C-alpha cells in the first residue's frame, strides 16, 4: 500500500520574540513507506519491552496506518537517522475512534471533534524521555491546527501518569481501567483533554512543560501542513459550539 497524505493548508509558526531551541533529533509526520517502516520498527521495539505478547502483532504496518484520518509521527536521530520515537494520531473525521470499538464515550464527548493518540513508543533512557516530550508537543500542534476539540488517550499503567501530569481528565471513573480490543484487551485508563483551554490551565497550574510547549520554538518539530477539519463525520451539530460542562480541569499530582 502507498502512503496517502491529505492536502495541507496550515503550518506552525513561532510567536514574535519566542526563543528558538534545537534538538538532537527531528519529529516529522511519516510520508513514505521507508518512514513508516522506521516507525513500525521503533513501535515494535518499544512495545516488546513492556507487552511482548501484544508486540508480536506490531511487527508490520497496520491497516489504519494508511487511513486518511491518520497521521503517523516519527522521531529520528540527527546523528545517524535511526528511529527513536513514534506515535499515531487518529481523528473521528470519517469513523469513530479505535477505542470506541471497546467503549462508549460519555455524552460530553459525543458530537465533538476528537483525536486519539495510539502506538506511542520511544527509545530507552534519557533521550527517550526527551523524545516523548517532543512528540507530545507535536500532538498539541496538530490538535490546535486541525480543529480538534478534545484529545482522547488510552494509557496502560504506568503510562497513564504522563497524561495525568499533562492535565488530562479521566473519561470514566477515577483511574478506572478498561480492556481495549485494539491493544490486545490490555486494561487502559481512558482520558481526555480540552484543547481550547490548554494554555490557560497549564499557566494556572504553573506547569513545568509550559516553557517547552508554549514559549519555545523547536524547528526540529515540524508536522508539516495541517488541514483544519470543519466537518467531522461523527459530529452532531446540535452538540457543537459550547464548552463541555462536564469537563473540569485536574491538577498536577
Image (cartoon, rainbow, N blue to C red):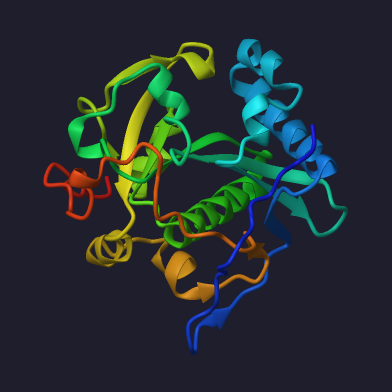
Which quadrant of the structure image shows residue 208?
A: bottom left
Q: Which quadrant is the N terminus positioned in? A: top right
Q: Position of residue 65 (x, y in %)?
A: 66, 33
Q: Position of residue 249 (x, y in %)?
A: 20, 50
Is residue 156 visible in the rendered structure shown here?
Answer: no
Say which residue appears at 34% left-offset and 55% top-offset: 195
Which image quarter: residue 109?
A: top left
Q: Is residue 26 left or right of residue 8?
A: right
**Residue 24 sits above or below residue 43 on the image:** below
Residue situated furthest bottom in the rendering: 17
What residue do we see at 39% from left, 50% from top?
A: 231
Residue 85 showing in the rendered view:
yes
Residue 112 point in image, percent of width and height: 30, 43
Above or below, 213 relative to 253: below
Residue at the image position 21 percent from the left and 55 percent from the top: 241
List the single residue furthest toward the left: 245
* Count of picture labels: 0
Give the left or right position of residue 222, taking residue 186 as reference: right
Q: Nearer the viewer, residue 213 or 37?
A: 37
> Which quadrant is the C terminus positioned in?
top left
Side (left or right) of 40 relative to 252: right
User: Which residue extends farthest right?
Assistant: 80
Q: Residue at x 85, y 58 (%)?
A: 79
Q: 229 or 30: which is nearer to us?
A: 229
Amino acid at each position: 500500500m502507498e502512503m496517502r497524505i491529505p492536502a495541507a493548508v496550515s503550518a506552525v509558526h513561532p510567536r514574535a520574540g519566542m526563543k528558538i531551541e534545537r534538538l538532537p533529533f527531528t519529529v516529522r509526520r511519516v510520508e513514505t513507506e521507508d518512514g513508516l517502516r522506521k516507525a513500525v520498527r521503533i513501535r515494535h521495539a518499544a512495545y516488546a519491552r513492556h507487552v511482548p505478547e501484544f508486540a508480536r502483532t506490531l511487527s508490520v504496518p497496520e491497516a489504519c496506518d494508511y487511513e486518511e484520518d491518520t497521521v503517523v509521527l516519527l522521531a529520528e536521530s540527527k546523528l545517524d537517522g535511526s528511529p527513536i520515537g513514534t506515535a499515531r494520531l487518529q481523528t473521528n473525521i470519517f469513523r469513530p475512534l479505535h477505542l470506541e470499538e471497546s467503549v462508549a464515550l460519555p455524552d460530553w464527548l459525543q458530537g465533538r471533534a476528537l483525536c486519539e493518540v495510539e502506538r506511542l513508543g520511544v527509545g530507552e533512557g534519557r533521550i527517550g524521555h526527551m523524545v516523548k516530550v517532543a512528540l507530545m508537543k507535536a500532538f498539541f500542534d496538530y490538535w490546535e491546527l486541525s480543529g480538534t476539540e478534545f484529545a482522547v488517550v488510552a494509557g496502560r499503567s504506568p503510562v497513564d501518569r504522563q497524561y495525568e501530569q499533562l492535565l488530562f481528565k479521566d473519561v470514566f471513573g477515577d483511574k478506572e481501567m478498561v480492556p481495549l480490543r485494539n491493544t490486545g484487551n490490555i486494561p487502559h485508563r481512558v482520558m481526555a483533554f480540552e484543547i481550547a483551554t490548554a494554555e490557560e490551565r497549564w499557566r494556572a497550574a504553573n506547569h513545568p512543560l509550559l516553557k517547552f510547549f508554549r514559549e519555545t520554538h523547536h524547528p526540529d518539530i515540524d508536522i508539516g501542513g495541517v488541514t483544519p477539519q470543519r466537518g467531522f463525520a461523527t459530529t452532531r451539530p446540535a452538540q457543537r459550539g459550547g464548552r463541555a460542562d462536564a469537563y473540569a480541569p485536574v491538577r498536577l499530582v
